Image (tube, helix red, strand yellow):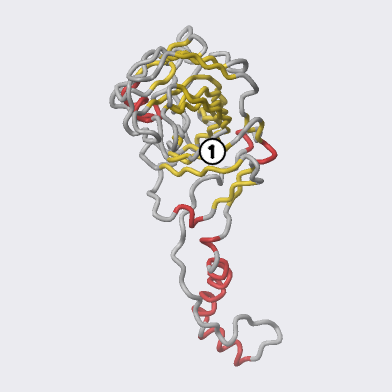
């Protein structure tokens, strides 16, 4: 088994180019046809697409679970699809090439203008709870071959409705030193008249100190303090790696790769230093459980990933 190293990469170009024209990728995939005038599905983005440093091709079979709020009620949606990319420069998936026709469980993936591949928007179930059978016709040096993945799909068992509403970026604060401590900060029944006079004369400074001493004391370590934790170890099944992705439709992207054996993934304000502001109406939090298998064919490294992708949309509606 080869060691994999993940780097940033999103399958946004495929969503933008193939399915939406000028629409944002958050509106791109999938959209199920209406039945009797009622749409039973909603538009969702694809999960974060990891890249691998020594890969010439990456093919992902994904089972996706999305929670989105409809009016005030959360709505959980599920679907399956395949994603694939091929490159002539190992590990560099910013420049792709045509590898011919790609099928997953006999379903042909659509090829975008940027030469990335994604399941058709009309396909919502591929039978990925069983096998994942890839068929590559071959092109541009990629040979024709088939590859079969068996086994249980990766899963993350911490139910999406239980995810904390605080799982959003919290930015660092600008910290200031405490004001000087006043001689007297409280008065009571045993205080002298001079104490009372001092208190009244310095009330503004005293109240400012009391306020700052309860907040700024904590702020001295605030930016380095864990604000929330995402449970990992006890909730993953058949998983090698977990990728946590925080994203919105305006370009905010924060990626964290954690081991499946990590107890939790902690988040603190310092993690978001320098990151742009995010749009809460399109913000989503992803936990992607990944199981991978690699093979070498014709001196090229191809990685076949199974992914259980769990995505919660914050303040997003139909």
- Name the residue at 37% across, 24% down: 116
The foreground one among 253 and 190 is 253
Based on the displayed image, in which of its 4 quarters is residue 136 positioned? top left
The foreground one among 237 and 21 is 237
Above or below, comparing residue 159 to residue 83 in the picture: below
Q: Which residue is mark 1?
A: 3
Is 112 displayed left or right of 266 in the figure?
Answer: left
Above or below, comparing residue 216 to residue 47 in the picture: below
Is 86 displayed left or right of 128 in the figure?
Answer: left
Above or below, comparing residue 256 to residue 145 in the picture: below
- Name the residue at 34% across, 29% down: 88
- Name the residue at 57% across, 59% down: 225
- Residue 198 appears in the picture as rendered: yes
Element carrying mark 1:
loop
Residue 178, image x, y percentages: 51, 76
Residue 201, image x, y percentages: 51, 86
Residue that extends furthest to the top in the rendered view of this protein: 36
Is 24 displayed left or right of 231 in the figure?
Answer: left
The foreground one among 236 and 190 is 236
Image quarter of the N terminus: top right
Residue 264, image x, y percentages: 63, 46
Residue 224, image x, y percentages: 54, 61
């Amino acid at each position: 088994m080869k060691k994999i190293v993940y780097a940033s990469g999103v399958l946004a170009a495929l969503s933008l180019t193939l399915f939406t024209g000028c629409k944002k990728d958050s509106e791109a995939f999938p959209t199920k046809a209406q039945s009797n005038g009622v749409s039973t599905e909603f538009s969702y983005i694809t999960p974060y697409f990891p890249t691998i440093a020594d890969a010439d091709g990456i093919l992902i079979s994904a089972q996706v679970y999305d929670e989105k709020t409809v009016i005030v009620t959360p709505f959980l949606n599920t679907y399956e699809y395949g994603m694939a990319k091929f490159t002539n420069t190992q590990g560099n998936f910013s420049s792709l090439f045509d590898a011919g026709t790609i099928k997953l469980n006999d379903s042909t993936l659509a090829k975008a203008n940027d030469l990335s591949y994604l399941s058709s928007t009309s396909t919502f179930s591929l039978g990925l709870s069983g096998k994942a059978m890839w068929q590559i016709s071959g092109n541009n040096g990629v040979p024709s071959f088939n590859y079969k993945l068996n086994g249980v799909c990766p899963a993350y068992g911490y139910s999406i409705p239980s995810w904390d509403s605080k799982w959003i970026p919290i930015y660092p604060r600008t910290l200031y030193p405490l004001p000087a401590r006043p001689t007297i900060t409280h008065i009571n029944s045993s205080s002298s008249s001079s104490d009372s006079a001092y208190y009244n004369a310095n009330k503004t400074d005293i109240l400012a100190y009391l306020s700052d001493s309860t907040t700024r004391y904590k702020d001295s370590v605030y930016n380095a303090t864990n604000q929330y934790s995402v449970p990992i170890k006890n909730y993953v099944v058949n998983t090698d790696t977990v990728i946590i992705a925080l994203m919105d439709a305006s370009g905010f992207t924060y990626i964290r790769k954690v081991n499946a054996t990590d107890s939790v993934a902690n988040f603190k304000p310092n993690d978001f230093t320098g990151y742009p502001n995010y749009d809460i109406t399109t913000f989503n939090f992803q936990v992607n459980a990944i199981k991978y298998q690699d093979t070498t064919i014709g001196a090229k490294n191809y990685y076949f990933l199974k992914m259980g992708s769990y995505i919660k949309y914050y303040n997003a509606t139909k």
